[in-house]
Image (cartoon, rainbow, N blue to C red):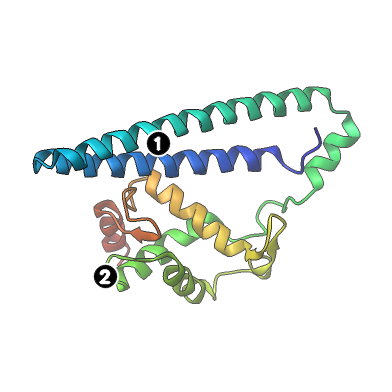
Amino acid sequence: MIENNPTNVSSAFEMLLEEVEAEIDFTNGVGSKAFEGRDYDKAKEALESSGQLTAFRDKVASLRKEWEDLAAKAEREEDEETRAERRNLGKLRKGLRTPESSFYLPLLQVLDQMGGRGKVADILDRIKKAMKPVLKPVDYDPLASGPDNPRWRNTAQWARNSMIRDGLLKADSLRGFWEIADKGREMLNKAK
């Protein structure tokens, strides 16, 4: 198997699993509220949906494991020339792009200006303006995986995932929205 960068696929699986987990948590919350409100039909519907989502998550986790096994086998079997090509294809030298952590504070500031939450497209438009003095020329280059997706946008989305993991943004926001968490507000207040 010759791949450009098998860690990109592993990262994509991680992102997908995180999003599915967030959807399961959201659905569980809907079911819990319905149960508390004695809306048993809606609670049953949420329970069934959670079951389907959990089964889907398990399938994705199984596919991730299968991918990791395939990638490990390919790595063991590939020759040194192919290995060298893999290291040089599509990879940016370290330090050339703006680091993910540079997006944290601007992202929190943009969300704060938007009242604490906003639509992803609106947030990214504002991030682009806020980050303009910081972004490097290479940040505007399109990614090989998506010619319409500039590197800075991808980095901002990865920053969002890391910020959710760190508790700075809410994991249970509505689909298509990003929302600041209490811990993110604390970080923003400390920065002011």
**Amino acid type, callout 1:** Leu
Q: Position of residue 63 (x, y in %)?
A: 58, 30
Q: Nearer the viewer, residue 175 or 137?
A: 175
149 left or right of 166 in image: right
Q: Position of residue 111 (x, y in %)?
A: 34, 67
Q: Residue at x 63, y 25 (%)?
A: 66
Read off the residue under disc 1.
Answer: 53
> Farthest residue toward the front?
41
Q: Which mark is residue 115?
A: 2
Report how far apart the C-alphas of labels 2 and 1 lie in the structure: 31 Å
Q: Nearer the viewer, residue 178 or 80?
A: 178
Q: Quadrant of the C terminus?
A: bottom left
- For label 1, the crowd category at 10 Å Cα-Cα, with few meaning under 14, some 14 to 19 and many 20 or more, is some
Q: Which tag is nearer the camera, tag 2 or tag 1?
A: 1
Q: Residue at x 58, y 41 (%)?
A: 11
Lower sequence index among marks 2 and 1: 1
Q: Residue at x 38, y 48 (%)?
A: 164
170 left or right of 90 in image: left
**Amino acid type, callout 2:** Gly
Mark 1 secondary-structure assignment: helix
Give the quadrant of residue 45. Answer: top left
